[in-house]
Amino acid sequence: MWPYNVDMRLRGLFLTVAAAGLAVMAGAAGTAALAGADPDGVAGIGQDAAVPPDGSPQCAGVHRQRVRIDFARRDVPVRYDLTKDTQAITAMGGETMRGAIGRGMTRDSFRARFTVDFIVEHVPGGVCMVPAAVKGEAGFDDMTVYLASDYPEGSCQYRAVKEHEDTHVRINMGALDAAFPRMRAALLAAAQGAAFPLFAPDRDAGKAMGTGQIDAALIREADGFRRAREAGHHMLDSPASYQRTEGECTSW
């Protein structure tokens, strides 16, 4: 934007981040949706496709499963809003504007979430939990570009502001291009990792513990995605960048 403002929500992790002028406020992190229906009382799970045993010593006889993963990318079209003038866009930016005039703004809503299906094997004193499948998605729910109505479509000012905001959109999409494969790989690696089979006193506790292990891996990658976005937006919203953009038109 001018300055850039983003409302980024990672639901399912439920990490809510508002990065305005690169100030970050984090909400509740690591509350991914818990497992769906999972088979119970399954012994000798998948021996022909099993990974060597690891995890909790109480589960020494239980093998980790080769986990099925269905992790989809979600993309939405960019929506352009030309109904707000510079005063309204400035007000939307709030304190992040620091006295600047809001000529454009890009807002988006990002979400990454997943569920896990576990196989449960009863052992003395509790249960052993093994992930069988991970299903989820990551991507943008919304991508809205606000262009000040003060500048008629086709004018020099309109084109300059639109190009600036479109660059913010490209930064968002480029960061997702890089991060999405890593998010998927992190989910799979965590679900097949050494934490499993996981011993727990009961199935509900095991689902919470197991999902938390996988959730932590996704949070790490989501945080890297956030940092990459912020770095790109910060460079674009530098004083030198603003000066170049303003220099494209003779008047504002």
Image (cartoon, rainbow, N blue to C red):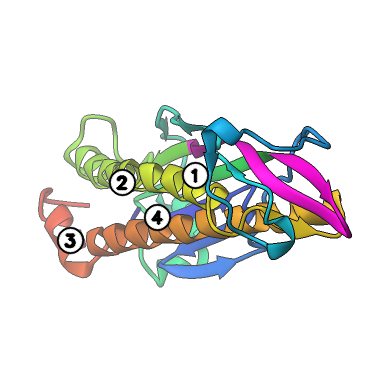
Between disc 2 and disc 1, whose residue precedes?
Answer: 2
Q: CA distance from mark 2 to mark 4?
A: 8 Å
Q: Residue furthest top?
A: 77
Could you tell me residue 216's position as x and y percent? 57, 60
Q: CA distance from mark 4 to mark 1?
A: 18 Å
Q: Are marks 3 and 1 in contact (CB under 8 Å)?
A: no
The residue pinned by badge 1 equals 188
Q: Secondary structure at mark 2?
A: helix
Along the viewing direction, whichever of 60 and 67 lies nearer the viewer:
60
Q: Nearer the viewer, mark 2 or mark 3?
A: 2
Residue at 27% x, 58% y: name it. 232
Q: Can residue 64 be seen at all in this image of the molecule? A: yes
Classify 10 Å Cα crowding around label 3: few (below 14), some (14-19), many (20 and above).
some
In the image, what residue type sits under mark 1? Answer: Leu
Along the viewing direction, whichever of 9 and 56 lies nearer the viewer:
56
The residue pinned by badge 2 equals 178
Q: Can residue 3 be seen at all in this image of the molecule? A: no
Quarter of the image for residue 117 reads top right
The residue pinned by badge 4 equals 225
Residue at 41% x, 72% y: name it. 98
Quarter of the image for residue 22 reads bottom left
Could you tell me residue 35's position as x and y percent? 73, 41
Between disc 2 and disc 3, whose residue precedes?
Answer: 2
The residue pinned by badge 3 equals 241
Residue at 53% x, 60% y: name it. 18
Could you tell me residue 178's position as x and y percent? 31, 46
Between disc 3 and disc 1, whose residue precedes?
Answer: 1
Quarter of the image for residue 156 reads top left
Image height of 185 relative to 219, above or below:
above
Q: CA distance from mark 3 to mark 1?
A: 40 Å
In the image, what residue type sits under mark 4? Answer: Phe
Q: Name the mark on residue 74.
A: none
